[in-house]
């Protein structure tokens, strides 16, 4: 069944100018890009987007990082998109990520780890809707 999932190319990857390579890997893996834009997250939007992590010790650090520069948000669609995309990006900590995954290739650390990916089908829908109106999706 087709699913949606949200990719965010995080500020570390945009700073390194590797967003093109990351988008290529995602496209090569068979994901359709429904919508894509470069934005600068406000403190308020970063706080809301990561609200689920509010009680975790790294919440503030995560929000500061995510507002430290522009990001590219990409709405993706594919059969089994959520699990397949998480497999493509690899573990949160690049030291634990499998060879060939986006985080293994491009992430610097557990916090500055190049990309975001939705963690469930429901969150895929919710997170795409956080950044895109339905009319912005092709
Ligand atoms: P993900 O689903 O693989 O992105 O991982 P999580 O949902 O566990 O964490 C969300 C994001 O918070 C990660 O992608 C990292 O950017 C960041 N993060 C996770 N663990 C840590 C940590 O221990 N310290 C800091 N500073 N950031 C972290």
Image (cartoon, rainbow, N blue to C red):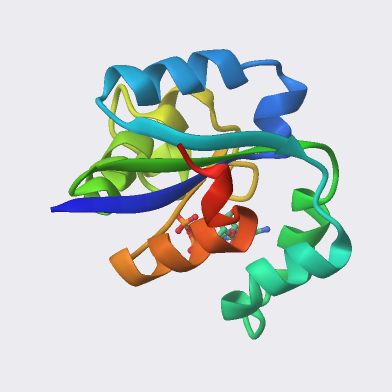
Q: Nearer the viewer, residue 67 or 128?
A: 128
Residue 56 image position (x, y, % from top left): 62, 79
Q: Residue 26: x and y, percent?
A: 38, 26
Reply above or below: 121 against 76: below
> Residue, x 32% and y 66% (percent of image)?
120
Question: What count of labels does the image hold?
Answer: 0
Q: Is residue 15 above or below residue 54?
A: above
Q: Residue furthest bottom?
A: 55
Horizontal side of 77 relative to 40 (left or right) equals left
Q: Residue at x 77, y 40 (%)?
A: 39
Residue 48 position, x and y percent, is 71, 73
**Image quarter hosting the C terminus:** top left
Please indicate, yes or no, whether residue 58 appears anywhere in the rendered image: no
In which quarter of the view is residue 129 placed?
bottom right
| Nearest the eye: 55 or 109 | 55
Q: Quick check: which quadrant has ligand 1? A: bottom right
Between 84 and 37, the residue placed more toward the observer is 37
Residue appearing at x 50%, y 43% in the figure: 137
Residue at the front extreme, as displayed:
135
Residue 113: quarter of image = top right
Please provide percent x and percent y for residue 54.
Answer: 66, 81
User: Is residue 42 shown left or right of residue 71?
Assistant: right
> In the shown orientation, is residue 69 left or right of residue 124?
right
Instruction: Give residue 18's quadrant in the image.
Output: top right
Residue 22 seen in the current view: yes
Please tell me which residue is depicted at 58% across the width and 44% down the height of the picture. 136
């Amino acid at each position: 069944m087709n699913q949606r999932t949200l990719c965010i190319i995080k500020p570390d990857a945009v700073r390194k100018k590797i967003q093109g390579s990351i988008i290529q890997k995602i496209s090569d893996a068979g994901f359709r890009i429904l919508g894509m834009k470069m934005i600068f997250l406000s403190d308020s939007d970063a706080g809301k987007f990561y609200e689920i992590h509010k009680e975790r010790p790294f919440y503030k650090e995560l929000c500061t990082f995510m507002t430290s520069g522009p990001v590219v948000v990409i709405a993706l669609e594919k059969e089994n998109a959520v699990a397949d995309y998480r497999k493509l990006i690899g573990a949160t900590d690049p030291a634990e990520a499998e060879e060939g995954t986006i985080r293994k290739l491009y992430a610097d650390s557990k916090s500055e780890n190049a990309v975001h990916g939705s963690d469930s089908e429901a969150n895929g829908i919710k997170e795409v809707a956080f950044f895109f109106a339905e009319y912005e999706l092709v």
